[in-house]
Amino acid sequence: MAIISTSLQGDLKGGAASALLTIPLAIGFGLFAFAPLGPRYTQFAILAGLYSAIIVPIVAVLLRFNSAVVFAPRSMTSYLISGVAFHLLAVRTAGDFNDPSKLLAVMFLIMLAAGIIQSLFGVLRLGEAVKFIPHPVIAGFQNGAALLLLTSQINPMLGLPRHVTFAQIGGSLSLIQPLTLLVGVVSCALMMNAASLTKRIPAVIIGLFGGIGLYYVLYALGLGEQLGHIIGGIRFELPGLRNIQGVFGALQDPTVHRMAPLILASSASLALMSSLDALLCAKLMETVTRQRSDSNLDLIRLGIGNAVAALFGSISSAVSLTSSHANYNSGGRSRYALLANCTLIFVAAYFLTGLIALLPYVVVAGLLVVTAIRLFDPWTLQMLRQLATADGARARSLTGDLAIIVLVTGFAVFADLLVAVGIGIIISIASFLVRMSRSVVRRTYRCDAAHSRKVRDDRIMTLLAEQGHKIAVFELEGALFFGTAEKLANEIERTAEHGVNYVILDLKRLTDVDNTGARLLLDIQDKLVRRGKFAALASMPERSRIAGYLRDIGVTAAFTRSRIFADTDRAIEWAEDHLILAELGDMELGNEFPFRSLDVLQALSEEQLEELKPKLRRYEFDQGQQVFVEGAESKELYIIARGSASVKIRLTGTDREARLVTFAPGTVFGEIALLDTEPRSATITADEPLVCYVLTASDFDEIKKSHPAIAILLLTNLGRELSSRLRRVNRIIYQLDS
């Protein structure tokens, strides 16, 4: 019997693999987060990154988190924290932050508040709502973070001193260290091409140790003066109460009180964007782990974890895709992998600080450069390629999205993080309002070509082709609320003024209805009735939320059940029946369809009809009785004299049936089996008491031998019927496509 179970072995291996990846990334993102504060905060930045990778997972496990997902510092959260630090330095007044501990206390106070807000997002069940930020806004932030992360690594990649700004690089070319750049480029190249070398070792590890190896080979060759610095001495300190005291001390500081709006805005921005980043990464990991996550519960855990981490001097964490993939691929499946991960990081931070101190800055910079390159939004690059060949509306749409991306990216890089967040929120709200104010009508079509699935005799079909324009179908999509209701009312009003007597509202794609939208439906019904016209609702499942709301408001009662249909096809059939009755009176409602008027018997003389009548046997079927079933070997042609019959299929996974076609009096069905002698391709059921004339295959064979002229006329009429059906289908396809 194994001392350690197989699953636990997998968790330990996964924890070790993910820890090995997390350590250099946590160090790099810690340095990035505190970069605006200068080199004096290097040790603090490294420990803040490592603490985060330890504390947040422990809190998550204590809150019953149990998944292969690994929490660690992320480029997006580090970018946001870096922006907060830069903003605090930019707005400080003389003497406010001369004490470094006060500036740090304010930063961690912001991270603490952000963690609390993040957990409130989960408590208020806003986990899904956060995702409604438009993708161009997200892409703008993502590209901004990538650019800032990339530019922040230029100095260590080139071996330039920290005080050399981006604008001064052109005048400092003599200070560039080519060997340092070589180490950085090799680290980047190894990380980006690791998959072509081996798939068993993570790319980060190959890039890390390859860069370190090259650095110290050059150092051993006596070229140390031409190489950049190493991280240097680090003294590991356990998180204590000093940071907690500093944070709560800041709460009592009058200077901090005056900065309350800035602190709250920064906290909300950090919470919003880090929540979005975490949720998107969690969704990506669901496809790997095959485990569905509760987005709201995840935000609660992550928010509390980040709040606790801030109290102990750590930066915020989120879902680390790199570490999570390494954990899962190495066998990690449960919370024990997460515990193994943070335990190994703690051991490395406590006992191996001497080795961490030997890590060259340029190698860390190389890893962050690759991270920045991969952080660039691929959708943005794809749109740029598409814009080169797009034209018309597509080009305008792409240009609009790219303009938003460039605007948000520009503010994030050249202006200020809070301004960028504010611009992003304004764009999100404006985008929502524009989207919601668009017409709720997805498509409108008349029923002179697009008929119901009820097949009628040629005389009736000709009438529907001539008068079907009096039936109009409105397919609704999106939300019917105060912003879209008026436009819908105006469109229906204009349509009703142009000869439409029957208005069908297809609600299949309607996502929401407010009180104004429901009242609009009542107004439409009332106005049309007063003008002698009719309205019907289609595709409204009885048990849906929208159906319940419309029932409570009184819409269902106003339309009555006779004009509320399960699908658009039934609604169109109702309107057609009504139209036929209005145009022809009760002619179609006779006891039986006149024998001489049957389309399949057209052009037959009286003598030929008398010869044929004995071969046409009269059958009656009760409502619900099957005329024939799919796969049957029967070879009969059926001509409907009274009633109707339908071909139906049961929808998979539901208790509902869908109608494929209905045959009305005067039409034929079953003719295919008579002609090709193959088994029946469908089941046909009587919708109501049904009377049919039936011609069997054997009788038809006799007619072909004894009266070939009659057989030829029958085949001609059947061919005309089939071609007529094909033409109707073509017209429907053309109209719907256009």
Image (tube, rainbow, N blue to C red):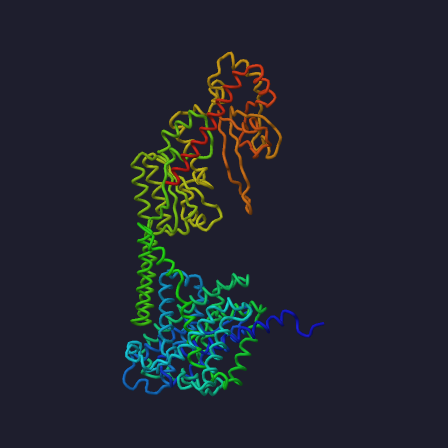
Residue nearest the observer in this picture, 252 or 67:
67
Residue 152 in view of the camera: yes
Pick the quarter of the image with the C terminus.
top left
In this view, 461 is above or below 227: above
Place residue 415 in its image quadrant.
bottom left
What residue occupies the far front of the structure in this picture?
Answer: 221
Residue 574 in view of the camera: no
In this view, 577 is above or below 524: above
Give x and y (percent) for residue 485: 33, 48
Q: On the picture, is 58 further left or further right than 179? A: right
Give x and y (percent) for residue 495: 31, 39
Give x and y (percent) for residue 409: 33, 66
Q: At x 52% / y 16%, what residue is drawn? A: 709
In this view, 3 is above or below 355: above
In this view, 570 is above or below 35: above
Q: At x 32% / y 65%, what residue is drawn? A: 408
Q: On the picture, is 699 further left or further right than 531? A: right
What residue occupies the far right of the structure in this picture?
Answer: 1
Count of numbered tags: 0
Q: At x 55% / y 79%, what residue is drawn? A: 344
Q: On the picture, is 576 further left or further right than 527? A: right
Residue nearest the observer in this picture, 600 or 679:
679
Pick the quarter of the image with the N terminus.
bottom right
Residue nearest the observer in this picture, 407 or 421:
407
Give x and y (percent) for residue 256: 33, 81
